[in-house]
Every structure is written in structure tokens, then in C-alpha cells.
Image (spheres, helix red, strand yellow):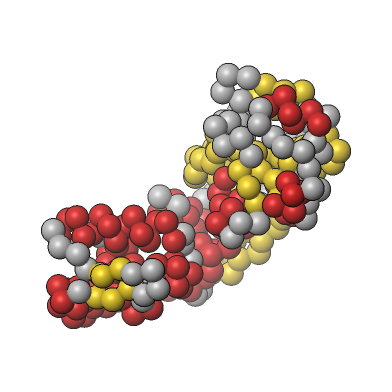
Amino acid sequence: MNIKDLELFIAVAKLGSFSKAAKSLDTRRALVSRRIADLEKQLGAPLFTRTTRVMKLTTSGQRYLSQITPLVNQLKHAGDVFKHRHDDVQGKLRIGLQPFVDKLMDKHIANFIHAYPQVQLEVFIVPGQIQDLKRLDLDFMLNVGEVSKGNIHSQKLMTFERKLYASTLYLENSSVIETIDDLHYHSLLGYRSAEGILEDNWIFQHTEISANHKVICSDYNSLYHFCLGGAGITLLPQVIAIAAVENQQLINVLPELSAGFKDINILYPKDHIISAATKAFIEHLTQMVK
């Protein structure tokens, strides 16, 4: 049991719905439902009575809500006593984000700004090439994929999985997809890396397909929007497709297939002086994406 689960419970109790609570906390409805079920299992008693239209607190749920609400508020504000330490961190940070990585980091960056009011951020959207670090005099860069340069320090931030997606609009007007071979008869959208390497073969766990792309993009944001607009089928990071899937705008095509996992890394030159602001930002991101 942790404070996040208690915050979910309080949100559901106030809003009377898993969906509304998920939206208010910027998370997924399925996650809220699972966490509440786990909480009820730990407590050994139901917290809500559920019907098709409404959720109401049980007597035990009402009692539990009244007990934990003040405690959760105290815990949330307990860190305020350390705020002066954040105020001591000052300066300017120049950071580079690849397209799509910015979509994942926007809320974490906003939280950092509020936590460290004396730090100024200058954010550059970059293709992800190592040269960008020196060319733009960046303190660090968030980059997708492996880095083999000897003078670059690489620290893994998070991992994402890629799967096949298409919009409902596209699928409504296209032939049925039952096997990987059916993809040969569809419009495929491809990815070219920052190094110029085209992913002309889509490789899955035990099979692969030669992809004759109708559109080729150099970033996942563009692929996402073309796919959402109905241009065709593409490989997308699951983390940026999940909201559109829940809203039934995108469909995970052949969901048993996975194109594997890739890392998002924090990169900075080994000979670069790491400022207190840089250390604070990297620590902040690392904690947020756990």
C-alpha cells in the first residue's frame, strides 16, 4: 500500500467513477480499477458498491475515507520542509529532446519547474544525433537507442516496447488483417533513424516482414499523427499509443507481435562539468519514470 493508491481511492470516492478519477490523475482507467481492487484485497473489505451506472462508498469505505484523507494531505505536504534546498539549486539548463520523447517528458518537466523555481530550462527538439550535444552546447540530451561513442556517458532512463497500430478509420476501409503476410496488401508507414538508417524489415519475436513503405518519417511523433489520420499501419512505442487505444482511435493490429524493446537514454559528454541543476534534473526524471 502506498500514497498513490490512497490518492486513487480518494479521487474515485470524490468523483464516483474510475474513468473520471483516471482522467483527473492523468492515468488509465484499467490501472485505477486494478489498484482499487488490490487495495480492497489488502484491507479485506469492499470499499465501493458497483452498479452499471454509479459507484458508491460502502460503510467501511466511508470510514476509511475519513481516516486517510487528512493523513494523505499531511504526507503530500511533508516535503515542503525541504523546499529551501530546491531553492538553492539555480542556473540555466540546455536540454535536447527527440520528437516523441518530448511527449513523454512534458509533465515531468512541468513538475521540475515547480519544484526548482530558480532553474531556467532551454529545451531544444533535436533529431537525436550525438553531434547535437556539442553543436547546441547542451547539458544533456534524451536519446532513443544505443550509443557507442567512447566520450559520451549514457544512462538508461526508461524502456519502451513497439507494436503495430492502425487507426479505426484506416481499418474500416481496408482488407482484414489476420496474419503477418496480410500486411503486404496494406499501406505501411516506416521509420528512419537519426543516423539515416531505414527500418525496411520489421522484425518480430519469431518472424519478420519486408516492409514496402508508403510514408517514411524520421520521428515517432510524425508516425503517430500519420497513423492516427488513417495513412496506414506502423510500429509505434506503446507508451505514446496507449491513450489513443483507450479512446478507440488506434487499434493494436496483430497484438501477439512485438518488435522488441528500445531504451531512452540520458546522454552527456564525459568531460562535461555536471552542474547541480543538471544533477537535480536527472534525479528528478529518474524518480518520475520509475
Residue 250 appears in view: yes
Identify the image quadrant of residue 262: top right
Q: Residue at x 13, y 58 (%)?
A: 44
**Can you name the residue that lies furthest to the top here?**
206
Q: Residue at x 34, y 55 (%)?
A: 34
Left or right position of 109 against 185: left
Quadrant (top left/top right/bottom left/bottom right) for the N terminus? bottom left
Relative to 192, say whether 29 is above or below.
below
Percent x, y for residue 11? 35, 74
Q: Residue at x 49, y 45 (%)?
A: 157
Percent x, y for residue 64? 17, 74
Residue 284 appears in view: no
Which residue is more in the foreground, 88 or 167? 167
Which residue is more in the foreground, 266 or 201? 201
Percent x, y for residue 132? 73, 46
Question: For the image shown, how many numbered marks are present on the structure?
Answer: 0
Q: Residue at x 47, y 55 (%)?
A: 285
Relative to 89, say whether 182 is above or below.
above
